[in-house]
């Protein structure tokens, strides 16, 4: 199971990479493996302000649709355009080209409440 130590995680299986006051958000390697082949990523929150734990979109796999929950409050700046034509990037490179949204962080204190890689491993029993 690939869990980079430099990222933060949620119990809902999202990861966060913080770069200054910007956060890149995607789903974990564990989540994509549980979902199976991802066929569509639907994000309708670009340019919208969202709160921590709000649904910011959905990921559609062959057999299921799963809500995506925001790990942090802020404004959605960008959807990863690569996923429009290649949603399978979420499966093949969940922490790289498979990132889903870029968020302007509204409250940096929320970062402290997120899980470390070790804490997330406990959640998924790894």
Image (cartoon, helix red, strand yellow):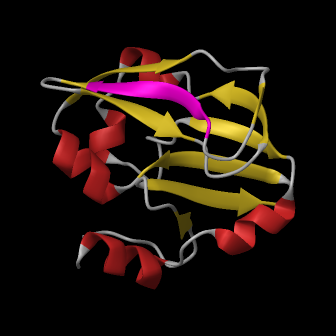
Which residue is located at x 79 percent, y 20 percent? Answer: 47
Q: Is residue 66 left or right of residue 5?
A: left
The prevailing secondary structure element of the residues shown in magenta is strand
Which residue is located at x 68 percent, y 39 percent? Answer: 102
Q: Is residue 74 above or below residue 79?
A: below
Give the residues drawn in magenta, as a range: 54-60
Number of marks = 0
**Residue 40 on image: x %, y %:** 33, 19
Which residue is located at x 51 percent, y 25 percent? Answer: 57
Tell me the quadrant of the picture where the C terminus can be found.
bottom left
Q: Quadrant of residue 44?
A: top right
**Residue 28 on image: x %, y %:** 38, 55
Outermost residue, bottom direction?
A: 118
Which residue is located at x 61 percent, y 69 percent? Answer: 114
**Of residues 80 and 11, which is closer to you in this image?**
11
**Is 63 inside the magenta-drawn segment?**
no
Q: Is residue 99 left or right of residue 108?
A: left
**Of residues 43 and 53, which is closer to you in this image?**
53
**Residue 26 on image: x %, y %:** 49, 45
Q: Is residue 74 above or below residue 29?
A: above
Q: Is residue 89 left or right of residue 4?
A: left
Tell me the quadrant of the picture where the N terminus can be found.
bottom left
């Amino acid at each position: 199971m690939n869990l980079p130590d430099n990222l933060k995680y949620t119990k809902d299986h999202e990861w966060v990479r913080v770069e200054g006051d910007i956060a890149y958000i995607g789903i974990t390697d564990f989540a994509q493996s549980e979902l199976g082949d991802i066929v569509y990523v639907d994000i309708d929150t670009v340019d919208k302000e969202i709160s921590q734990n709000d649904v910011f979109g959905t990921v559609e796999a062959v057999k299921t649709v799963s809500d995506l929950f925001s790990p942090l409050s802020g404004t959605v700046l960008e959807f990863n355009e690569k996923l429009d034509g290649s949603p399978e990037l979420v499966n093949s490179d969940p922490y790289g080209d498979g990132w889903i949204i870029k968020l302007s962080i509204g409250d940096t204190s929320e970062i402290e409440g997120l899980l470390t890689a070790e804490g997330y491993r406990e959640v998924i029993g790894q």
